[in-house]
Image (tube, grey):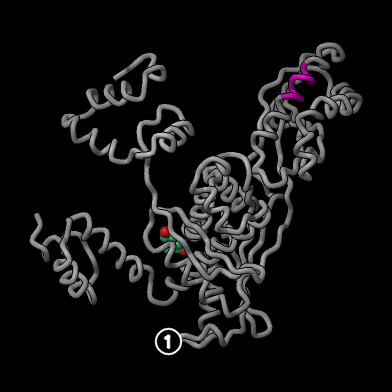
Amino acid sequence: MQINGFSKLSKKEKINWLLQTYFHNETEAKRVLTQYWHNDAKLQALHDGFIENSISNFFLPYGIAPNFKIDNQLYTIPMVIEESSVVAAASKAAKFWLDKGGFKTEILGLTKIGHIHFLYSGSTQELIQFFRRNRPLLLEAIAPLEENMKKRGGGVKDLNLIDRTSKIDNYYQIEFKFETADAMGANFINSVLEEVAEKLKILARHQLTGNLNILMSILSNYTPDCRVKAIVNCPLEALETNEMSGIEYARKFVTAIEVAEKEPYRAVTHNKGIMNGVDAVVLATGNDFRAIEANAHAYASSSGQYTSLSHAKIENGQFYFWLEMPLSVGTIGGIAGLHPLVKFSIQLLQNPSAEKLMKIIASAGLAQNFAAINSLITSGIQKGHMKMHLNNLLNFVNANEKEKQIAYAYFNDKKVSFSALKKLLNRN
Ligand code: MEV
């Protein structure tokens, strides 16, 4: 049903409209919605303030994975995720690597990119001369915006005119390179771009013979030069299992990675496993998981074929397993200073810089990937998953303690299915 002026309604009016329009049992729907309201009105108002038309809160579990040794420092990592087994897998992998030197990391760049996209109808040569002449003026225009960021070691690092007329008629960009210190930097970058675009418009009007039309000014969430690497390694013998020697295990592992490197169908699932770890920490620290996802997958396809973000090799009796990915995150700005649980996460991680958070997130991604490949090449993925799946199903059918014990015993050596569980517990 269409409604006009919805955003002007009070929270109560919005909910009333919603309940009357879409629900038969309004009382029950209202109960579901309001049971998640926070008792503390101030805290509720804080959460409502994050977005528009907020009517309730949507809970996700906040788990923790201890025993992460990253560059010789121990961390307990916060993970916000709805999927069972992810936190357990991260913890298990962290513990496995703990006495093998842990995770080692390296920042491979901190450069972020933004563009003013515009059309120019005149000659390219004239535009190049114009840009060269006015470059200092453009930089001058953003000096006040940059002042604080510069104090923190960030700011505009470069700007260049790029001719894209081979892609679209009359299309050019001014490409900016930024560093944004401990902030993710989206607000700073977009403010700088818009300010320069305004100045550009004015200068162009007076100095250019053709028409310069600003199309848009926006950061790029693709940051291949803001990148981090996390690696683990150990002697082959340390990988021995009951079923396989260390070398057999390592070879199987490396081949599984090779499959993800060469086969996009597998690469997507493989990288999804990495993102299980990455996104969970990204969410817990109040960062933008959509930007992180878009960035990661663009990077994974940068060769022209979608491929694995992680790699592995055997060399001189050692097993090496590493992840390299772009990550643009912040530990200040955004909701970092507002959301109490985000603040808690940042404190739990010992107040990391953005660089350190990149390293922690990459380690969580690598741990998750290790755990997944380990399961896949040994017991299979369902074994661990099914235990949690059974718990979820038992909760879904409101099983009591006795029924739970019956189900655990019954499914100990059988595949879990909802129909088998319903049959076992006499549910329709
Ligand atoms: C499930 O969320 C993630 C996995 O499918 C990842 C993988 O297959 O590598 C287990």
Q: Is residue 236 above or below residue 379?
A: below
Percent position (x, y) of residue 406?
A: 15, 71
Q: Quadrant of the N terminus?
A: top left
Quarter-of-image position of residue 212: top right
In the drawing, does residue 268 fall left or right of residue 319? left
In the drawing, does residue 169 fall left or right of residue 43? right
Percent position (x, y) of residue 83?
A: 38, 56
Residues packed near mark 1 inside 10 Å, few (<14), some (14 to 19) or many (20 plus): few
In the drawing, does residue 320 fall left or right of residue 378? right
User: Looking at the image, which residue is at 44% across and 74% down?
Assistant: 377
Reply yes or no: does residue 200 show up in magenta.
yes
Quarter-of-image position of residue 145: top right
Quarter-of-image position of residue 391: bottom left
Percent position (x, y) of residue 175?
A: 76, 35
Relative depth, front residue between 399 and 42? 42
Q: Quadrant of the C terminus?
A: bottom left
Q: In this view, does 361 lie above or below 238?
A: above
Answer whether residue 128 is visible to the viewer in this image: no
Reply yes or no: does residue 319 show up in magenta.
no
Relative depth, front residue between 46 and 40? 40
User: Looking at the image, which residue is at 14% across and 66% down?
Assistant: 403
Instruction: Tell me the residue that label 1 is attached to.
Output: 243
Q: Which range of residues does the magenta coloring cover?
A: 195-201
Q: Is residue 237 above or below residue 162?
A: below
The count of marks equals: 1
Relative depth, front residue between 409 and 337? 337
Quadrant observed for ligand 1 in the rendered image:
bottom left
Answer whether residue 318 is visible to the viewer in this image: yes
Question: The residue tagged with tag 1: helix, strand or loop?
Answer: loop
